């Protein structure tokens, strides 16, 4: 997959989907890469990974807000329908409201995860190799 990661690249539905797929794939690859002891040389390597993951998580609330705002704007313009599901069938406004509420919960969860990652990094920031590497 060849994706332009610059923030100035033109937006499109296809690029947005590709970026989301790459984000998910990157997490999978990082999980596999860190299964091996050789993935790290010293405790500060763990610290760096935690800070980078924290940085990624810190960006999620903005993304979630943008997703829910886009759907709300489309609904306000009459371009959203509920294609399935019993609960909100025929009531896109109810679905959009539910999405907004769930988005707020997800943003709060991301904030909690970010705080937890920072707490972990406060510990890993104090660790060092005990002897020669």
Image (spheres, helix red, strand yellow):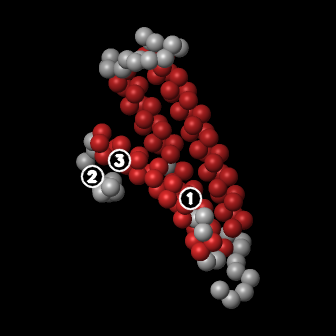
Answer with left or right where residue 104 lies relative to residue 2: right
Q: Are marks 3 and 2 in contact (CB under 8 Å)?
A: no
In which quadrant of the rendered image does the N terminus lie?
Answer: bottom left
Q: Is residue 55 above or below residue 80?
A: below
- Tell me residue 99's x, y (percent): 50, 26
Residue 88 shown left or right of residue 124 in the figure: left
Mark 1 or 3: the one toward you: 1
Which residue is rendered at x = 42% and y = 10% of the image? Answer: 90
Q: CA distance from mark 1 to mark 2?
A: 28 Å
| Label whose residue precedes the other's in the sequence (1 or 3) | 3
Residue receiving disc 2: 9
Quadrant for residue 108, please give it: top right
- Residue 31 percent location from the top left of the image: 56, 58
Q: Is residue 45 visible?
A: no
CA separation, marks 1 and 3?
20 Å
Mark 3 sits on what residue?
Answer: 18
- Looking at the rendered image, the quarter that the C terminus falls into is bottom right
Snapshot quadrant of residue 39: bottom right
Q: Secondary structure at mark 2?
A: loop
Sequence-wise first label, 3 or 2: 2
Label located before the other in sequence (1 or 2): 2
Q: Residue furthest left?
A: 10
Distance of label 3 from label 2 (alpha carbons): 13 Å
Q: Which of the two discs, 1 and 2, sits closer to the camera?
A: 1
Tell me if I can see residue 1 in this picture.
yes
- Residue drawn at x 45%, y 42% is 63
> How many other residues sit within 10 Å of disc 1, few (<14), some (14-19) or many (≥20)?
few
Q: Give the residue at x 68% y 89%.
A: 132
Q: Which residue is mark 1?
A: 31
Query: What crowding class fits label 3: few (fewer than 14 Cα within 10 Å), some (14-19), or many (20 or more)?
Result: some
């Amino acid at each position: 997959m060849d994706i332009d990661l610059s923030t100035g690249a033109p937006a499109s539905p296809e690029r947005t989907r590709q970026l989301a797929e790459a984000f998910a794939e990157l997490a999978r690859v990082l999980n596999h890469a860190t299964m091996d002891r050789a993935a790290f040389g010293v405790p500060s390597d763990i610290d760096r990974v935690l800070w980078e993951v924290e940085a990624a998580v810190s960006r999620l609330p903005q993304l979630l807000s943008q997703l829910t705002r886009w759907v709300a704007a489309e609904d306000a313009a009459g371009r959203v329908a509920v294609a399935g599901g019993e609960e909100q069938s025929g009531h896109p406004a109810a679905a959009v409201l539910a999405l907004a509420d769930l988005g707020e919960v997800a943003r709060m969860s991301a904030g909690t995860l970010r705080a937890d990652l920072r707490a972990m990094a406060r510990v890993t920031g104090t660790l060092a190799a005990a002897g020669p590497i």
